Amino acid sequence: MIQLIVGGRGKGKTKHLLDKVNTAVKTASGNIVYLDKNSKHMYELKNKIRLINVSEYPLNSPDEFVGFICGIVSQDHDLEQMYFDSFMVMANITDVKDAEPVLEKLEKISEQFDVYFVISMSVDESELPDALKSKVIVSL
């Protein structure tokens, strides 16, 4: 399953994402991974959550990003949840319309490997393609 947290820049999406991941770790039976474009929020995450600073890796396209996610999923059979802050920046997506095929691939990965994704995107809900609007859990 994929859930989206959407809103313009500086609206508080990261705070919602951090609250959600830190709450989830209390009841999770598997591993949790938090992907971010930097390590700025390292000390705001509970110590059981694995932070990955995506900018440390040479990812230059949405397909490379999906491959990176597949690598993480394949190496951790206890992976239960993944949280993405600044999804479009990390995945090298400049237009929200280009996010839809990437999110469709992530949905397939989620279903196949039973990994739950929560993704923050710096777009207004009104800009999302109709197929993605049902996945929004927070709109700021």
Image: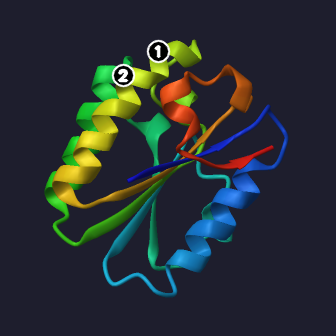
Q: Residue 119: image x %, image y %?
A: 53, 46
Mark 2 touching mark 1, by CB under 8 A?
A: yes
Can you give x and y, in whole percent of width and height, for residue 127 in the image?
A: 68, 20
User: In this picture, is 51 found above or below 80?
Assistant: above
Q: Quadrant of the C terminus?
A: top right
Q: Judge left or right: residue 49 versus residue 140.
A: left
Disc assigned to residue 98: 1
Per the image, label 2 sits on a secondary structure element best described as helix
Q: Which residue is mark 2?
A: 101
Q: Residue at x 32, y 68 (%)?
A: 80
Q: Count the numbered circles shown.
A: 2
Q: Secondary structure at mark 1?
A: helix
Q: Left of 46 or right of it: where is 123?
A: right
Q: Nearer the viewer, residue 74 or 11?
A: 11
Q: Is residue 126 visible?
A: yes
Q: Nearer the viewer, residue 84 or 4?
A: 4
